[in-house]
Amino acid sequence: MAELKRLSESRDLTRIERIGAHSHIRGLGLDNSLEARAASEGMVGQLPARRAAGLILELIRQGKIAGRAVLLAGQPGTGKTALAMGIAKSLGAETPFASVAASELFSLELSKTEALTQAFRRAIGVRIKEEAEIIEGEVVEISIDRPLSAAAGSSAGPSGATAPGKTGRLTLKTTDMETVYELGGKMIEALGKEKVQSGDVIALDKASGKVTKLGRSIGRSRDYDAVGPHTKFVKCPEGELQKRKEVVHCVIT
Ligand SMILES: Nc1ncnc2c1ncn2[C@@H]1O[C@H](COP(=O)(O)OP(=O)(O)OP(=O)(O)O)[C@@H](O)[C@H]1O
């Protein structure tokens, strides 16, 4: 019984979030000189208020009001939340927007501090910059070892079903060097998923094993009479195959 009671008490703010009536808002609808357009990005009218919000947006972009708050005052339903959302949308997809209504807080069985902490947590985005070890080069050849049992696979390429114990070799080159890498089952599967073939320029993240196809090597452009609209030709990388690159990810709760 005690266990049941505890479960029913642990309520979360997200459960009673209101259905957003602001899905039409994509920004503040301003031009380059921060003047409000009559109707743009889902916003109409309210020109002076949108222009003022644009000035706040610029201050945020320049990092000049970090740690401060802005109070918007006005009659109910006049667009205060819409302006706040317009600012958040203009700052980009990595800027979270969290809204809390006072009436929700006071009807919750949750402590007010906990409810506000949860809301703040949802409003925080974290940008992580890290250096990753990347192997970047043009694929010269992929060879998959033929399994002992003849029916289990072929040496034609990495695509198709993969056996967990499969092994193979990947030959990559830059304009200055060429190296053969041993492949395990997981890597063969990742290359197959991306449909990697010789002539592709790829990047392999050493830590996660993630394979990214950067495009076809320009040197191979004569292999085709015609290519699809999504085929991108890139230069064969120069220098060392293994590089350290700065990667940025954004984490939004
Ligand atoms: N300038 C605008 N252009 C387009 N839609 C708007 C504009 N201003 C407000 N709206 C829409 O009108 C509705 C009411 O606005 P909003 O909820 O922003 O008002 P509010 O001032 O925050 O209200 P309350 O004080 O009751 O919280 C929302 O659906 C909002 O998206």
Image: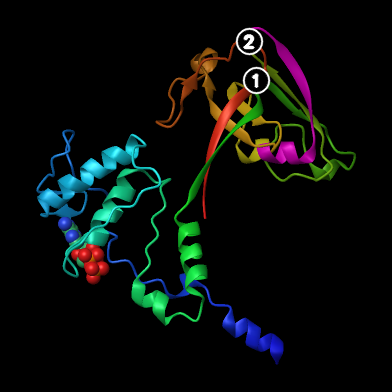
Q: Identify residue type, mark 1.
A: Lys
Residue 164 sits above or below residue 137 on the image: below
Q: Nearer the viewer, mark 1 or mark 2?
A: 1
Residue depicted at x 18% and y 46%: 52
Q: Quick check: is 145 in the magenta stretch?
A: no
Q: Identify residue type, mark 2.
A: Gly
Which SS class for mark 2?
A: loop
Q: Are circles 1 and 2 on residues that touch, CB within 8 Å?
A: yes
In the image, taking residue 180 as reference, residue 199 lies left or right, namely left
Which SS class for mark 1?
A: strand
Q: Which numbered tag is attached to residue 219?
A: none
Q: Nearer the viewer, residue 250 or 153?
A: 250
The residue where tag 1 is placed is 243
Q: Which numbered tag is attached to residue 239?
A: 2
- Residue 23 coordinates in the image, percent (x, y): 29, 60
Residue depicted at x 63% and y 10%: 239
Residue 210 sits above or below residue 118 on the image: above
Q: Nearer the viewer, residue 55 or 140?
A: 55
- Residue 123 coordinates in the image, percent (x, y): 44, 55
Q: CA distance from mark 1 to mark 2?
A: 9 Å
**Cβ at disc 2 under 8 Å from ligand 1:** no
Outermost residue to the top:
176
The range drawn in magenta is: 176-190
Q: Quadrant of ligand 1?
A: bottom left
In the image, taking residue 194 as reference, residue 13 lies left or right, namely left
- Residue 178 coordinates in the image, percent (x, y): 71, 13
Q: Nearer the viewer, residue 139 or 222?
A: 139
